[in-house]
Image: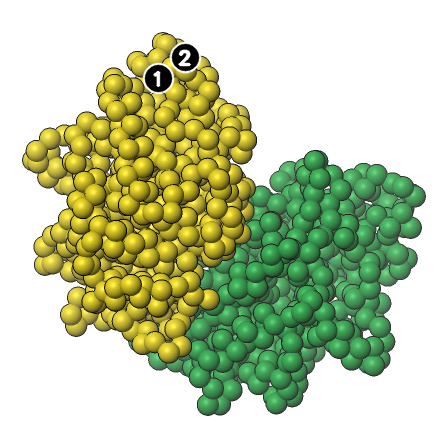
Chain colours: A yellow, B green
Amino acid sequence: MKKLSLVDKGFLLSESRETPMHVGGVSLYTLPDGANESEFLHGLAANMRDAQTLLPPFGDRLKTGRLGVPGPTYWQPDPALDMEYHVRHSALPRPGRYRELFTLVSRLHGTLLDRSRPLWEMHLIEGLQNRQFAVYTKTHHAAVDGARSTHVARSMLSADPSHRLEESPLSLNTWEKYKANLSLGKRPDYSTSEMRDVTDVLKASLDSGANIFHAVKGFANAWSGRNDKLALPHLNVPRTPLNSNVDGARRFVAQSWPFARIKAVAKAFDGTFNDAVLAMCAGALRQYLQTHAELPQESLKAMVPVSVRQPGDVDSGNAVAAISADLATTVADPAERFRQIQSSVQAGKDYYGEMSPSERELFFMIIQAPTMLLVPTGLISRLPAYNVAISNVPGIRQPMYWNGARMDGSYPLSIVMDGMALNITLVTYDQNVDFGIIACRRSLPLVQRLIDYMEEALQELEDAAGIQAKVTKVAKQRPAAKRKSTSANKAKPKPKAKPKKVRGRSTKPKQ
Amino acid sequence: MKKLSLVDKGFLLSESRETPMHVGGVSLYTLPDGANESEFLHGLAANMRDAQTLLPPFGDRLKTGRLGVPGPTYWQPDPALDMEYHVRHSALPRPGRYRELFTLVSRLHGTLLDRSRPLWEMHLIEGLQNRQFAVYTKTHHAAVDGARSTHVARSMLSADPSHRLEESPLSLNTWEKYKANLSLGKRPDYSTSEMRDVTDVLKASLDSGANIFHAVKGFANAWSGRNDKLALPHLNVPRTPLNSNVDGARRFVAQSWPFARIKAVAKAFDGTFNDAVLAMCAGALRQYLQTHAELPQESLKAMVPVSVRQPGDVDSGNAVAAISADLATTVADPAERFRQIQSSVQAGKDYYGEMSPSERELFFMIIQAPTMLLVPTGLISRLPAYNVAISNVPGIRQPMYWNGARMDGSYPLSIVMDGMALNITLVTYDQNVDFGIIACRRSLPLVQRLIDYMEEALQELEDAAGIQAKVTKVAKQRPAAKRKSTSANKAKPKPKAKPKKVRGRSTKPKQ
């Protein structure tokens, strides 16, 4: 029986029906040629359920004593493990566009996991157009951190279309094989190490035996500018609809953009890929607030995990610091906005560059535990330390296959909570950047517009940089009456010649 | 702003993620000839969402003060009512049998409603075989009692296939029209009266200003045999797997039987329809416990709402008392079992026949509020007052249509909770009796077998009575490899000649 760490318990304790503490992802696949959808998905489900012993804690449930979760809490094998419960079939109503998929995934992400069972679900979703199917996974943050869930997802994929899994990707055997392959690679992977108990890290980097809440509060104060020793460069976080309290319902939207387009903008402005992503999001958020709410007098601040040890490296093991980036949303000129964001990110990196490795590790723990950090200290609703979280997760830069089905995209669904009603997480995959945007349904009823605004913001940046780029056609949230919906619903949006200076035509907000 | 009654608040206070306090129903319909499924369902959804003002509290959400639900709590119009959230499209994975439908409905019934919105959801479900579609509704017991939700469901139906609703069935206009039609009928309907505040009833029938918990505990004591004044005839409730604590996951199964078959058994034994239903359930539960657990030394007791004022009348307004019926599960002979059940029910009715109308009204309140009754008093897990609830809800005895779609059946989903892991509710509709069985997924993993056992029990009763009846083919939970699944999946099971004395062939438990 493995004992839960304080961080893991924090996720359980701070969970409510309005703020479930699970993370998720939805992946799109194309059926192998000639495969029957129903048979293929039943085969995948059977394979997922086929495990002698599951990788902990996928077969374990919580065991608490008299005190409940606040007392000693352990993972214990579920005596009546019910794989049919965890691995599920779902289907989309016709016409099976991404609109219907996002609606279903929003609902699935808004319900709580059952605490009397292992804390995960997987949904195989049929009924998509164009021979695609989708897989939605949901894992409690107390059970599996982001890094490990990425690894589990990878362990089921292969670059070889003819590769077939022998046992469940969640089985201990498959995991051992995957780890063995990893260690044949260049170096041990930071994120697989046993670093989850934040108390150990705290003891090493701060006072020994420090009160964890006190220590965490110190970092919270730093983020909100009330701690001299750890002051962060960017303060004055404005209040916006992004920072209201949330209810239990969600809206999810997703979209892919070609990596090359965003990278070209970064290069033109002599910035990083991450700077360009932030500039794209900043432009979109500026337009969203201008159109649907009110643009605040102060610029939005974004919590951004950044790579500090080896700039430019896209491997997840290095994203060990979180900075509060100024999104320069008060600036109308896209080029100037890019430069202000860039210098703000650089200032943040410089600051963290001076930190010790153990301090960076501590930050790595903390950015995985936003609840632990902000909810117990009661700071979150009074002092929004940032307006939005924008996380860039390095992914696999080549096509991958699950038992022969090509993965077309993979979109993360993170956590929203009181004071942080919007989360944007992106993963690089193959030639694309896959954005997953999750929001509180009540606070941001029109969050799907962000997709259009992001395309528009990217085009503005390309114009400002003098780039002749190809426009990405965004997936329609609503059926376009006069438009062929088939191309709008392709997984890989078809690039077409960009109609320069007539952007208004295709990027105007749509009802 | 309407204030919530104590009973309604009881449902909110006692709710947990393991024991959601909503009731539901799933109805099957056949598409009108020539109708396109997708278009027809989108039309129904558009109609459901089309309301100027909703019947309270379908447009209202909870408003509490500093004290939360224990303090003053009101219904208040939702300022951002989101009908797209409440009226949803869902779909079944192929092959779209009842098995897939029951799986989806089990999942939908096992998640909590969002308390920051009006406490109801409706799911239009496509993808069923044989041109059928399904509708699952879910309403919080704090918002709408069983009687009212039956009325709302009826207000959308018509005996005329050509009838079309002008506005949403949930609109205040539709409700007013429905009520006006009702009052043209024979007499005002008891269950539409404003009788929900149990404190008023308690004040009238017990001491004035009585402490509600104290008063309710008195009835709980009666049910468990510790109150002389209100002692109930049947005590000695055994412990079974039906009475374990529950987790949040559910299993739902449903099946229709011809009303005439069950009624013929009742007639042969000189009993009521309800006696025959209980005998059928008793036989099935006896077999379930014998096969999958252990048959207790004492007979199971069932909580059964019975009609006391006008025996034989099937109108819901009369089901004002609840008795604890002895299911005689220790008795092997079906005829003798029937007679013991019958006399136990009669004893209960005699007892309640001596009660005053206000006492009966109080019981009517209380059987709607099992939580209020048993959970706060802490009695439920120590003293199961009954092993299972079996409720017979009078329905409409003719074919009904929703905008031209024929309703083929309507199956209730009630509440299970700690100590009561199984609920059987049946509705008479047209020529059938529609059984909805809901259970805790962990406590009764094989609850779908009850369907087979109920058919077997009915055949035993027919044999004992010397009736040459026609067998009802039960819907298969698992695809039968060697069997034509089309007929097994019809809404109206095809009657066929009964193979006398070879029942084992079709009623053996199946994997």
Query: What is the C-alpha distance between the residues marked 1 and 2?
Result: 7 Å
Frontmost residue, A338 versus B292: A338
Q: Chain of mark 1?
A: A
Q: Secondary structure at mark 2?
A: loop
Is B283 on the left or on the right of A22, as rendered? right
Q: Which residue is mark 1?
A: A202
Q: Residue placed at 23% from the left, 32% from the top? A: A307
Quadrant location of the C terminus of chain B?
Answer: bottom left
Pick the residue in front: A370 or A381: A381
Percent across and percent down for residue B179 are 78, 74
Q: Amino acid at mark 2?
A: Ala
> Quick check: A434 above or below A272?
below
Among the two numbered marks 1 and 2 on one chain, the one whose residue lies closer to the N terminus: 1
Closest to the observer: A17 or B322?
A: A17
Q: Chain of mark 2?
A: A
Q: Amino acid at mark 1?
A: Leu
Q: Nearer the viewer, residue B117 or A165?
A: B117
Choose top left, top right, bottom left or bottom right for residue A133: bottom left
- Measured as percent of width and height from the top left, residue B83 is found at 57, 64
| Residue drawn at the location 60% of the way across and 49% of the way down | B115
Eyeballing the image, is B483 above or below B448?
below
In the image, B264: left or right of A315?
right
Which quadrant holds residue A326? top left
Q: Residues within 10 Å of mark 1 (few under 14, many from 20)?
A: many
SS under mark 1: helix
In the drawing, what numbered circle is on residue A219? none
Q: Residue at x 20, y 67 (%)?
A: A497
Residue A52 in view, yes or no:
no
**Residue A510, position in %: x, y?**
43, 65
Q: Identify the residue under disc 2.
A: A210
Q: Are marks 1 and 2 in contact (CB under 8 Å)?
A: yes
On the rendered structure, is A443 left or right of B350?
Answer: left
